[in-house]
Amino acid sequence: MGAANVIPGVSGGTIALITGIFQRIINSIKSFNITAFSLLFKGEFKEFIKYTDLYFLISVFFGAVVSIFSLAKILSFLFSNYPIHVWAYFFGLILASVYFVGKTINKWSFSTIVFFILGTAIAILISVLNPAKENDSVMYLFVCGIIAACSMILPGLSGSFILILLGNYHLVMIDSVTNFDMVILLPVVLGAGFGLLAFSHLLSWIYKKFRNQTIALLTGFILGSLSILWPWKNVISTYIDKHGIVKPLLQKNILPNHYFDITNNEPHIIAAVILLIVGFLTIVVIEKFAQTKTEDEN
């Protein structure tokens, strides 16, 4: 989940849904309520741990945090030097996710089809929105944390891509994580914690009440996000951040042969296709592992 959340266009919630821990994560997060804090203040720590499924939540979020901090520098290097290869791998990863998430729908009906189309349309619309410019004010960073955290646990909506739209992806996920800049990270983390607690209650209720429609909407989100991950892009316009670094502002998806014409460089089609297949197979393996784990527990 941590690895997925670092990549713009990839959602940690998608990985949670595929591996079968999505509902458990939501239930665990929303259990931090008055009852939970009452148990904590009374010193009933065992009951508190059991009520909140704390060990499970710690293992998931600790793994995610370790992954985010360990991958930030690597991804910064890869995006700078091998952007087509990185995007191709994650395009394959998300392409497989559409199938594996969609197949968990118990019954397709008119309403599920409508929600699937709606989810796809919303994700595509988000992908063509113009990004805001970088903003390091404390209140704006807090709001970024709220919005990004909600999208991070929502399959198909990438928290990292939402940060791009908000203008703060490089500031938060690359610069601040790499340099461990707590002035930037602290308000984002506080916002994320608040957003997770508030959003988990709403998402849990919707998921239980309208399960098939919810999954159909999320599958549409995942399908629509593929437009963000298309490997071959042409930078239309750029902007200069506060550090004087030139960054892409608007990008347009193009065909590999057009990319070749523009750059006069090898578009790496064969390597990209291979990595796309590897990304697809990664999800297949994760799905098989999760299925085996569930069968063993049952």
Image: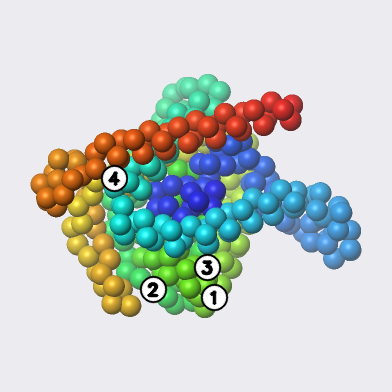
Q: Position of residue 250 (x, y in %)?
A: 24, 58
Q: What residue is at 67 percent from the left and 42 percent from the top? A: 24
Depth check, mark 4 against mark 2: the one in front is: 4
Give the Cα separation between the discs numbered 1 and 2.
Answer: 16 Å
The answer to whether marks 4 and 2 mark residues whose Cβ atoms lie closer than 8 Å is no
Horizontal side of residue 196 vs 35, given as left or right: left
Mark 3 or mark 4, earlier in chain: 3
Q: Position of residue 207 (x, y in %)?
A: 59, 38
Residue at 45 percent across and 32 percent down: it is 281
Residue 67 visible in the displayed image: yes
Quick one: 44 or 38, which is closer to the camera?
44
Type of the residue with mark 2: Asn
Indicate which label's residue lies in the foreground, 1 or 4: 4
Q: Earlier in the sequence, mark 1 or mark 2?
A: 2
193 relative to 87, above or below:
below
Q: Residue under label 3, please give it.
A: 188
Q: Which residue is mark 1?
A: 182
Give the residue at x 32% y 69%: 133
Provide the secondary structure element on which disc 2 rests.
Answer: loop
